[in-house]
Each structure stands twice: as C-alpha cells, then as structure tokens.
Amino acid sequence: MISIDVALGTRAYPIHVGAGLLDDAPLWRGAIRGRHVVVVSNETVAPLHLARVQAGLVGHLHASVVLPDGEAHKTLDAVARVFDALAGLGATRDATIVALGGGVIGDLAGFAAACWMRGIDFIQMPTTLLAMVDSSVGGKTGVNLPAGKNLVGAFHQPRAVIADTTTLATLPDREYRAGFAEVVKYGAIGDAAFFAWLERHVDALNARDGAALAEAIAASCRHKAGVVVRDEHEQGERALLNFGHTFGHAIETATGYGSLLHGEAVAIGMVLAATLSADLERAPRADAGRLARLLTAFGLPTTPPPIDPGRLLALMQIDKKNLAGRLRLVLWRGLGAAEIVPDVDADAIRAVLARA
C-alpha cells in the first residue's frame, strides 16, 4: 500500500492506494465518526463491490443508494435520492456518506455530504482509474445542469480516499483508457519528466501492469495533493488542473452527457488547448503533436465529433473559470508549463474548433 497525505491542517486526510483495500475495514472504518452510514454506488459497481464495503459496516446503521450508471445521471434528482436515504436512517450531523464508484458517484455523493445538515463526512472509494487519480482527491463536488457541467457544487474535502486497485480488474477497457487523460494531464501541465515516463511505459500501462499502474496512480495523486494543499479553493494554481477541461466540458454538454466519457472529452480538450497555444505562438507546435500521439497511444480520441463551433464557443463562455464574461483558459508554454490566460481571443478559439 502507498499512502499520501493531503496536508490541509485540521482537515488533513490520507489517500491509500493498493490492492484489497475495500476488504481492509480497519483501514477505513476509523474515518467513520458516527453510527449512520449511507453507501452511494451505481448499477455497474454495486454488484461487484458493494458487499465488500457492507461487510465492513457491522455495528453501523447503514443504507445503500444504487443509482443508474453514467454522466447523464449526475443530477439534483440523484442527490435527492441520497437525501431520502439519509432521512430514512434518521442520519445526524455525525453521519458519513461513502462514495463507491467513479467520478460521477464521487461528485454527487460528495455534494450530498456537503449539503446534508450543512455538511457531513464522506469517504471516497474510487473504482475507476480516472476517479483514483483526479476526482476523488481535492474536495470538488457537484452535479450537472442542462446548461452545463458541474455548475452546482461545493468544495467539501473527504475524510479519506481508499483506492483499491483490484477494482480496476473489472473496469471495461474503454473506461480504463479514459483514465489516462488525467494521468497524462499531470505531465503535460507540470512535469515533463513524468510525461516522458508515460511515453516509455505506455505499453505496460495499457496491459494493466500492476507495478507501472501503481506508480502512475501514486505520482498523479502526489501532484494533485500538492496543488490542492497550495490552492484548495482554486484561486490560482489549482485552476491549471483544468487544462483541456473548458473545451472538454463544452463538448460533453453539446453531445449530451454520456456520448463521450469524461476522460475522452478531456483528451480532446487538451489537444485543442495545445493547438490554440501553438496558434497564439505561446508554445511549440511540436509539443501539441507529442501530446496527441501519447493520448492516441492510450486509445483516446484527439478530435471532437462534428459540432457547430459557435455552439461550443457559447458553451465555453459560461465556464466557471471565466471572469466578467471574458474567456479565461488554461493554455501552456509547452510540455510541463501550463498557465492561465485571460481574455483569449474568441476568433482564435473559433478557428481551432473549425479546423478540428
């Protein structure tokens, strides 16, 4: 097991990465402070792993909420089902929500925890590669609206992150590969050496080699944890973690949540952001090509489906990172050097989208 601390003072919490951790109840049960526990999962993950968690909850009053699978179900209606389960238990302010699933489950369960009685504990138990390296760490929670992705949410840190790598064995190949978009992102925005390591180990990672996978997950979590500690509420450096996400979220919204996996949309978005950086003469065009090749090697798309550029641009203009209605994007100077760029020219963005 590899353990990484997110050192947020009195709200510090551990990230544990290793095999068989869901079955190691003494490891995670200490993060549960009260009697009441609601486990939130989905129809894909629950049949595989829910019983493992329930076995560790002997002595607690617990209930389970099993939601439909997919981004289309990350809604306020789904959160209301979690509230109903908490109410049914008579859950008090020392209750805990356990998020057992991928990023969708983690986001909406965390948001429910942030809202119930103005904030209760939750534990992240990510079961996808993408959630292990990104969404389970850092306390961003939220749900989607028809108008855009993650427009309703809160910063609410978990009590612990339990990343059991055995759950990845049951992950469909497409879901597994989608997780590498976020892994690649960490190298792209701040660690050129890690990016080069990924290029050398892409075959081992595609083959789900345990040693290579553990190293990639741990490196990603360390990077994310460090950024979160320095900028918990995304007032500066943490915004860099959104490299490719403004494009990606717009693509997800335009195509209807679920057509593309989140990681696939982020992969496309990163290439668009890198291409825009080259168009604006902020970065070498060769680096954009290198990024696209690595993402392609992981089986990820690098060009968007046919979507009207004007529609995408309109969706990008309501992104949370914008200020005073002005487009504010995460671009880069090349591999390992991302930056926040205000007042990005809309015509330059439209030109990149038209060529994609």
Image (spheres, rainbow, N blue to C red):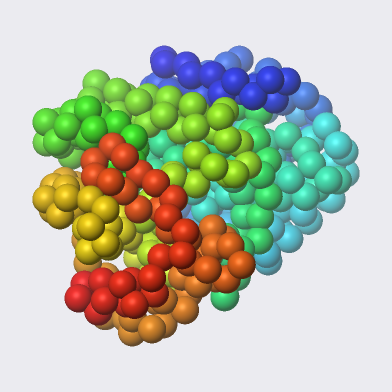
The picture quadrant where one finds residue 146 is bottom right
Asked if residue 207 can be seen in this view, the reply is no
- Which quadrant would the C terminus be assigned to in this image? bottom left
Please tell me which residue is depicted at 54% across the width and 33% down the height of the picture.
Answer: 228
Nearest the eye: 124 or 61? 124
Horizontal and vertical percent for residue 101? 50, 44
Nearest the eye: 343 or 63? 343
From the viewer's perspective, is residue 11 above or below residue 101? above
In the shown orientation, is residue 282 left or right of residue 112? left
Please tell me which residue is depicted at 87% across the width and 38% down the height of the picture.
Answer: 92
Please tell me which residue is depicted at 54% across the width and 42% down the height of the picture.
Answer: 236
Please tell me which residue is depicted at 61% across the width and 67% down the height of the picture.
Answer: 324
Horizontal and vertical percent for residue 268? 28, 61
In the shown orientation, is residue 93 left or right of residue 292? right
In the shown orientation, is residue 92 left or right of residue 253? right
In the shown orientation, is residue 79 left or right of residue 43? right
- Which quadrant would the N terminus be assigned to in this image? top left
Nearest the eye: 203 or 89? 203
Horizontal and vertical percent for residue 341? 42, 55
From the viewer's perspective, is residue 55 above or below residue 241? above
